[in-house]
Amino acid sequence: MKRLLNTLYVTTQGAYLSRESQTIHVQVEQKTLMRVPVQQLASVVCLGNVAFSSGFLALCSEFGVSVSCLSESGRFQGRMEGPVRGNVLLRRQQYRVADDESAAASIVAAIVGAKIANARSVLLRAAREHADDEAREQLKDASVRLASVLRSLDKGTELPVPLLRGMEGDAARVYFSAFDRLILAQKDEFKFTQRSRRPPLDPVNALLSFLYTLLVHECVGALESVGLDPAVGFLHTDRPGRPSLALDLAEEFRAPFADRLALSLINRRQLQGKHFERTASGAVWLNDKGRREVIQTWQERKREELQHPYLGEDCPWGLLPYVQALLLARHLRGDLNAYPAFFWK
């Protein structure tokens, strides 16, 4: 159970939410965990096996508190609310900003800056701990090149979105050029040369692609839960069937969460060559056993807490996409002057 930004996140499996006058009553196996006055909330997000009474829904509807339901892995399942008040206005503003390149530029710059800074932090942390001098120097060199891109972002002038996209692509190539140095075990089976996506051509790329898919699903659910349209982004252009805004949001978490989890699975030998299979076309995929291992570790890592850099509060990794989605919504509504992207420390 966690309250952040006037949102109650119910992550305890088997929890039951009911109404007590104007208070939300949270129980597990008939034991009271929490009572929250409904006036203190703007939304409730339920992840996984969470049940609630009709009285709870009526109370939330009466006070304009939205209720979002997601699977335990973060896939959006539905959203319930009373008479429509602000979501249509929020989405209209989202579309206006997406269509106005100059208005979108500040959001794109924040996302790109966070992505590059977080990737650089991953490289620097690995460089400090690496025993091999040559590898350490390559990691440091890549981090210096990323720092140069960050300085270009911090010059104070508003850069156009196409240029920001180009800078993001250049930074990604620099980061992945050093990625193989982060793999410390099972080098014969887990060799990384370059990023390959459709399809992944080696076990490392197959693992990264699977983790990125899980991450984007989390971000879709987070955006839906605050009333934003996951399909209309700012950094990623519109394309039928593509959740562009979810891809935008995921950029902040790729290196510090998904990539570090992939490296942990490989370096701790939780995944081995036997967890992958190669098709006749050369594509490499995780098999059933491999996917189960990844998902179990993913769920465990989501429960680990860190201090949110903007809020200054402890927050589980699994709730960070929801917090960032809410901060983005508040920026679009005009409650925040700028979007505070997630910078990992």
Image: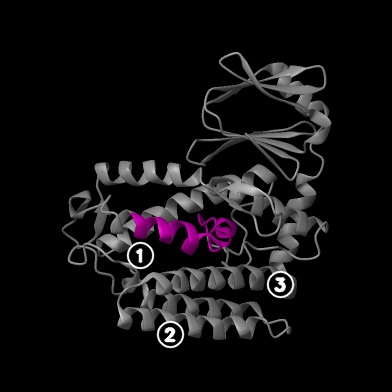
Q: Which residue is drawn at 51% across and 41% down?
A: 75
Q: Residue at x 35, y 69 (%)?
A: 182
The type of residue carrying mark 3 is Ser
Residue marked by disc 3: 106
In the image, which residues are magenta? 240-264
Q: Residue at x 70, y 67 (%)?
A: 99
Residue 218 versus residue 80: which sits nearer the camera? 218
Q: Is residue 80 above or below residue 190?
A: above
The answer to whether one can see residue 199 in this image is no
Q: Which of marks 2 and 3 is in front?
A: 2
Residue sticking out furthest to the top: 30
Residue 198 versus residue 133: which sits nearer the camera? 133
State the CA–CA distance, disc 2 to disc 3.
28 Å
Q: Which mark is residue 197?
A: 1
First in sequence, mark 2 or 3: give its number.
3
- Say if the magenta span includes residue 257: yes
Task: Please rate how many residues cluster around mark 3, counting C-alpha atoms within 10 Å: few if below 14, some from 14 to 19, many from 20.
Answer: some
Badge 3 marks a residue whose secondary structure is: helix
